[in-house]
Amino acid sequence: MPRPPVRLFHSRRPGATAALPLAVTTALTTVLVPLAATAAAAEEPSAAAGGRLDWGDCPEGDYGAGMECAELRVPVDHADPRGRHITLTLGRLPHTEEGRAEGSVLVNPGGPMGFGIEYLGTLGAPFAGLREHMDVVTWDLRGDPGGFGGFSTPIDCEWDYVRSPALPADQAAFDDLAAANRETADACRAADPELFDHMGSADHARDLEAVRRALGERRLNLHMTSYGGTIGQTYARLFPERVRTLYLDGVADHTEAGDAVYEGFAADGDEAFGRFTDWCAEDASCALHGRDVPALWRELIDAADSEPIPAPVADVDYTGRDIQHAAVGVLFRSTPGPEWAGVAQAIADGLEGDASGFVTDPERPFAGFPMPGVVECLDWEYPADHAEAAATAERIEEAAPLTGGRLQMYGNILSCAGWPTPVSNPPGPLPAEVPPMLGAGSWSDGGSTARAVDAVEGGVTIRRDGPGHGLYWMGDACVIAHADHYLRTTELPPADTIC
């Protein structure tokens, strides 16, 4: 099964079905504007209130899964509830057992993207067991970040897949990067400045609170994957008393400010390279078997940083950062075997002056992501000048001397420098009132997920000793069983659970 897209981490939408149309058909009925988030519990609708959402046909049918849809009007700016409103479109896979549902589970598969309804409708088979007892609900994000044709009110914006920026060499280069970023952002913002400025995960979380009210749920069960985890953590920060359960699958940690998240991802890369080094020492099929792999690696990276190494297969030159990013990507997504052997051979060839072995896609040889990052640039702090960017890069490399130079997430955040709208949802701690969370993650994202889950006492992260991203959506039966039990009962598995 294709993994959920992780725009901040370079993935793209799977081609599950044809793109959805931008317009929402009139078959769905608009409903009540949400009440203020500070209303007393006595004013909350009961779980049996119903009536606030008019569930009916979806614009593209039920996807063969029984999907139902409804519309909800929300303010563009939740601080101005009497101002302009936009339409959110919700999708629901109703519970399948007889009798009343045990409640709802709100699902976001990541991205950030605006086609959650299509994604759940076409790839939602793993939810079959949970769906026996609970309604599984999703929504298309406001603005449709990524331009994938979701049914909620979109921004008319051009998204392009661009190369992740290199660390600027000096202030002049930083200014050039910031100006280019600003030009890209302004072109998108011009279509709808008000909506553009209210596209961060705090806005999505407040939309989610409006959904909670419309559903008549006193507290929410949240199932958040990949970038959806940023929305989930933000909701927990803003509305801790409204969280019943929060399941995070393969997410970034949005609970620590500053460089902590970037340093954490860098350390995860060094851990991956450590696994590779151990394998190479044990397996004679490794082209570097019996040699000092970290020393050879460092020699290669230093050489490529001094003078980029040609990769004739793609007619490009690779810096040390390009090589680090390519190698770690393979080590995260595969198990010891032919692909790891390919990394070893690529290192050997690179030392001989040919970096072609690190090219996994000649048509797209460099790390990249869709731009503009209308959500990400409101959620993560980015550098104000060259000195700040260089200082962060230095700390990342200190945290991970073997692979930190790839910068990974921070490399993409450089694309926010010069952004026209200030950060509205920076990372920060979660309140103590948030209940213990459940996480799940693999080699590539287990560390970051655990760091998020550990922000609240008592949480548990299921670890998969292997590759993968979005383990629940991938159909991992072990993860699904633990997650479903937690979402239904609030009971967590043992702290050392491995799937």
Image: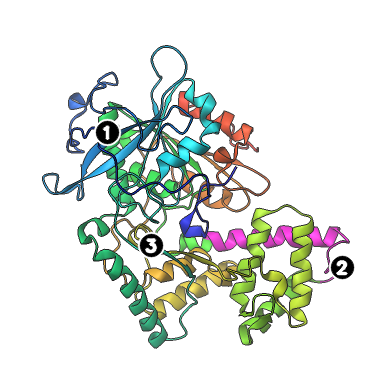
**Amino acid type indicated by mark 1:** Leu
Q: Residue furthest top?
A: 99
Q: In this view of the protein, can residue 309 be seen by the observer?
A: yes
The alpha-carbon separation of the residues under discs 1 and 3 comes to 30 Å
Q: Quadrant of the C terminus?
A: top right
The alpha-carbon separation of the residues under discs 1 and 2 comes to 66 Å
Q: Quadrant of residue 209?
A: top left
**Amino acid type indicated by mark 2:** Gly
Give the image location of residue 411, x and y in percent: 48, 69
Q: Quadrant of the N terminus?
A: top right
Give the image location of residue 368, x and y in percent: 51, 67
Circle 1 sits in a helix, a strand or a loop, which is it? loop
Q: Quick check: 56 above or below 226?
A: above
Pointer 2: what residue?
A: 290
Q: Quadrant of residue 376?
A: bottom left
Circle 3 sits in a helix, a strand or a loop, which is it? loop
Residue in view at x 65 percent, y 38 percent: 498
Give the image location of residue 164, x and y in percent: 49, 70
Q: Which residues are magenta?
A: 264-291
First in sequence: mark 2 vs mark 3: 2
Residue 315 within the segment the image draws in magenta: no
Name the residue nearer the viewer: 288 or 390. 288
Q: Tell me which secondary structure the magenta stretch mostly adopts.
A: helix
**Amino acid type indicated by mark 3:** Gly
The alpha-carbon separation of the residues under discs 2 and 3 comes to 45 Å
Q: Is residue 24 left or right of residue 312?
A: left
Pointer 1: what residue?
A: 28
